Image: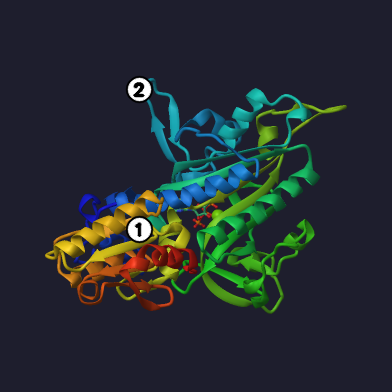
């Protein structure tokens, strides 16, 4: 992509209601735009990052046999009445009346709808287990939307739903999702800690949240510090249930007596095993080998549009973001620092086209701007590899590569440029 063709409306002024670093930087770097309270558009740069996140989530779910579907945002109130959540969900639910006086709502979550959907197709134990997921906008009329996309009213969530034969196979599925989440967040370049959580609104009795520890977070978790370096790979379902890490609410309501350390954090994922609460409400039973039974269910959420904000909270410098490699909007950026020189322009174009042809996701800053502007925009956007082509090219036929994670800076001769850039990208480790 050429910078001149890529719309990045960076802002000089700080928006007056942006209080935390991620919100400030997302506005400043032209990633998002507020349309009305708690409702945002994603601009090209922000959307590109969001799509990288989505692709990773999709890839891991598909690989685990979780089938992607797309359910609508608007739901009928009837199904929520049937599960008894229409009244109890409260003011966070946006209720809508259509022209025929039918009660609708903008879905805050999809347990009801997916249960009804599954019920219409799944009739026998032979069709179980089944796993579905979708990535869709949710609406929750948060009383105080704040911090930009971190706590929005309309936001993007990945939610998955599982249907199992019984509690035992439900637990196996729960453990599968627990480990899948750790793999997904690792691939996203985000260190998360699983913590035991109360099930709340959804129901059931087994639930965990996945938190990113960061001082500016709104949540609080209690944990045994040794868990921070744990990879949980060999954990059994019993180990998961016995985990010594808790959300604030779980820790307090269950009067946990362990001596644990408290951290500030951001909740990025939440999984629940709630059993047959919804299959029962909707009278969704299937034929078993002997008797009919209600499928055993779980649901598994990831706050997709909260992720970019959370990453910025934990990975920023004074003047910009440093995106983890796998979700960075581009792997690298070429800064043409002498657009008056024909030979610099020619070399920039050549190396840009040739890397692009090889499938490298690269941004070429070809604008007629001062070097200072190009450096500060590259810093603001947060691309991990900066390729400088300018004075050294003219004087010494070399270019400069800067790794923003380690600040390692090297000069490479023009003839080696392409291979060295590729090697640098491969070796980038966030
Ligand atoms: P929170 O405690 O932050 O209000 P929640 O527990 O109500 O979140 P869940 O129902 O567990 O949220 O939703 C799944 C995920 O969606 C959460 O883990 C979080 O990452 C994300 N999420 C929830 N509410 C919002 C919001 N208002 N804006 C952006 N993301 C959200
Ligand atoms: Mg939650």
Lateral position of residue 147 relative to residue 11, left or right: right
Disc 1 crowd rating (10 Å Cα; few below 14, some 14-19, many 20+) is: many
Give percent across and percent down for residue 101.
Answer: 40, 23
Q: Is residue 277 above or below residue 27?
A: above
Which residue: 80% across, 46% down?
168
Which residue: 71% across, 66% down?
243
Q: Is residue 304 above or below residue 112?
A: below
Which coloring applies here? Answer: rainbow
Disc 2 is placed on an element classified as loop
Lateral position of residue 268 relative to residue 23, left or right: right
Disc 2: which residue: 99
Disc 1: which residue: 148
Q: Is residue 182 above or below residue 60?
A: below
Can the viewer see residue 288 in this picture? yes
Label located before the other in sequence (2 or 1): 2
| The furthest residue to the left | 340
Q: Determine the CA span between mark 2 and mark 1.
A: 33 Å
Which residue: 59% across, 67% down?
248
Mark 1, ligand 1, within 8 Å: the answer is no
Which residue: 25% across, 53% down?
2
Disc 1 is placed on an element classified as helix
Give percent across and percent down for residue 263.
Answer: 55, 74
Q: Nearer the viewer, residue 204 or 81?
A: 204
Mark 2, ligand 1, within 8 Å: the answer is no
Counting every numbered tag in the picture gives: 2
Disc 2 crowd rating (10 Å Cα; few below 14, some 14-19, many 20+) is: few
Can the viewer see residue 31 in this picture? no
Give percent across and percent down for residue 59.
Answer: 55, 46
Q: In the rendering, which numbered label is found on residue 293? A: none
Give percent across and percent down for residue 330.
Answer: 37, 57
């Amino acid at each position: 992509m050429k910078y001149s063709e890529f719309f990045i409306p960076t802002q000089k002024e700080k928006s007056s209601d942006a209080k935390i670093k991620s919100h400030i930087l997302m506005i400043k770097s032209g990633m998002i735009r507020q349309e009305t309270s708690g409702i945002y558009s994603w601009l090209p740069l922000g959307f590109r990052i969001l799509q990288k996140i989505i692709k990773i989530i999709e890839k891991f779910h598909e690989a685990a046999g979780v089938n992607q579907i797309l359910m609508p945002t608007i739901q009928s109130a009837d199904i929520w009445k049937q599960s008894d959540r229409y009244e109890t969900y409260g003011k966070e639910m946006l209720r809508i009346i259509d022209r025929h006086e039918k009660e609708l709502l903008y879905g805050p979550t999809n347990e009801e709808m997916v249960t009804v959907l599954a019920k219409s197709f799944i009739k026998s134990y032979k069709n179980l287990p089944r796993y579905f997921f979708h990535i869709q906008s949710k609406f929750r009329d948060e009383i105080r939307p704040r911090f930009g996309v971190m706590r929005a009213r309309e936001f993007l969530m990945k939610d998955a739903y599982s249907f199992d034969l019984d509690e035992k196979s439900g637990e196996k599925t729960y453990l599968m999702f627990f480990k899948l989440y750790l793999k997904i967040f690792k691939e996203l370049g985000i260190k998360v800690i699983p913590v035991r959580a109360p099930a709340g609104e959804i129901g059931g009795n087994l639930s965990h949240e996945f938190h990113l520890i960061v001082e500016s977070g709104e949540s609080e978790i209690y944990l045994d510090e040794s868990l921070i370096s744990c990879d949980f790979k060999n954990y059994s379902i019993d180990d998961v249930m016995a985990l010594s890490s808790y959300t604030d609410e779980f820790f307090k309501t269950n009067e946990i007596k362990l001596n644990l350390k408290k951290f500030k954090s951001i909740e990025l994922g939440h999984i629940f095993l709630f059993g047959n609460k919804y299959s029962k409400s909707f009278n969704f039973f299937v034929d078993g080998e002997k008797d009919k039974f209600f499928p055993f269910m779980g649901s598994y959420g990831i706050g997709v549009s909260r992720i970019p904000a959370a990453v910025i909270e934990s990975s920023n410098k004074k003047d910009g973001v440093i995106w983890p490699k796998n979700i960075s909007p581009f792997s690298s950026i070429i800064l043409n620092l002498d657009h008056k020189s024909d030979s610099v322009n020619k070399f920039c174009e050549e190396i840009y086209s040739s890397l692009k042809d090889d499938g490298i996701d690269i941004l070429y800053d070809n604008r007629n701007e001062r070097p200072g502007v190009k450096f500060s925009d590259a810093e603001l956007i947060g691309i991990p590899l900066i390729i400088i082509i300018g004075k050294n090219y003219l004087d010494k036929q070399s270019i400069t590569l800067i790794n923003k994670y380690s600040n390692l800076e090297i000069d490479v001769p023009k003839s080696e440029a392409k291979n060295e850039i590729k090697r640098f990208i491969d070796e980038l480790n966030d």
